[in-house]
Amino acid sequence: MRGALLTRLAIRSFLYTLCVNRALLISLCFPALLAAAQNLIVCDEVPAMENLARQIETRLHQSSEITSQDKLPASLAPYKSVIVYIHRDLAEPAETAFIDYAKNGGKLVLLHHSISSGKRKNEYWFPFLGIALPESYRYIDDATWDVLPADGGSAFTMHDTEIYLNQAPDADRKLLLSLRFHDPKTGETFEQNTAGWVKKTGAGTVYYFMPGHKPSDFEYEPYVQVLIQALKS
């Protein structure tokens, strides 16, 4: 009887050890399996990102977790992509977490005001991205402007939404989208290849897409297709 009890205890101990070691193996070799969602969306304006999360679910059949920068998970590594949509200040802990995630093999997708004048004071952000915002940089609310894919695809028009002019990226990137904007107040026409790009950084990748000031921008079919293609790649 005692021998049978010891045998059962030994079997339980063995099975427990097997389960622990299996979980450890998965965490080391397949960290993405541990994430509750496949994509992490970090934002300070939720409605727009709820629209994007629905598009990702419908078109890619991937789940997305929406959070704020002060509630980041301890590790971003398990996520297939990290999408950043931060309008106000970018705190240094989040700044460094995003940079580390990309450099260590992640796909970091930056939307609209994740590159804007409010980030000038961040120590690492613009040097990491290879971006400058010169004195001529400016934004215009409620503008109507054209987006031109670099691959020769069909141009489309963003209606009554914010545009950034005179961003200055370095040459270390692949250009994806250009913009064309005629300012009705000054008569100037701007044609700049700054509306979308992708660049390698360490073992990972950074994407940037300028459109997206309004929640409805993330329901606009031509633009949604661009974002979904980047998330799918």
Image (cartoon, rainbow, N blue to C red):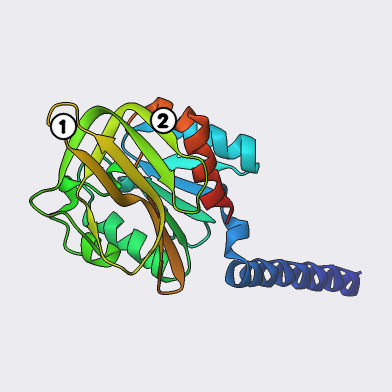
In the picture, measured across the screen, residue 34 lies left or right of residue 190, that is right
Amino acid carrying label 1: it is Gly
In the picture, measured across the screen, residue 116 lies left or right of residue 102, that is left
Image disc number at residue 202: none
State the CA–CA distance, disc 1 to disc 2: 26 Å
SS for tag 2?
Answer: helix
Q: Please name whichever residue, 200 or 40, is drawn nearer the observer in this view of the structure.
A: 200
* Label 2 crowd (10 A; few <14 / some 14-19 / many >=20): many
In the picture, measured across the screen, residue 37 lies left or right of residue 49, that is right
x and y percentages locating residue 203 in the rendered image: 46, 73
In the picture, measured across the screen, residue 199 lies left or right of residue 161, that is right
Amino acid carrying label 2: it is Asp
Task: Name the residue: 63% across, 43% down.
Answer: 60
> Is residue 64 shown above or below 204?
above
SS for tag 1?
Answer: loop
> Is residue 209 shown above or below 95?
above
Q: Please name whichever residue, 194 or 6, is drawn nearer the observer in this view of the structure.
A: 194
x and y percentages locating residue 226 in the rendered image: 50, 44
User: Which residue, given by chain and number where applicable, does mark 1 sit on?
Assistant: 187
Task: Name the residue: 31% across, 51% down.
Answer: 194
x and y percentages locating residue 146 in the rendered image: 36, 36
Q: Is residue 39 visible?
A: yes
Quarter of the image with the C terminus in it:
bottom right
Image disc number at residue 217: 2
x and y percentages locating residue 166 in the rendered image: 19, 49
Q: Please name whichever residue, 143 or 90, is drawn nearer the observer in this view of the structure.
A: 143
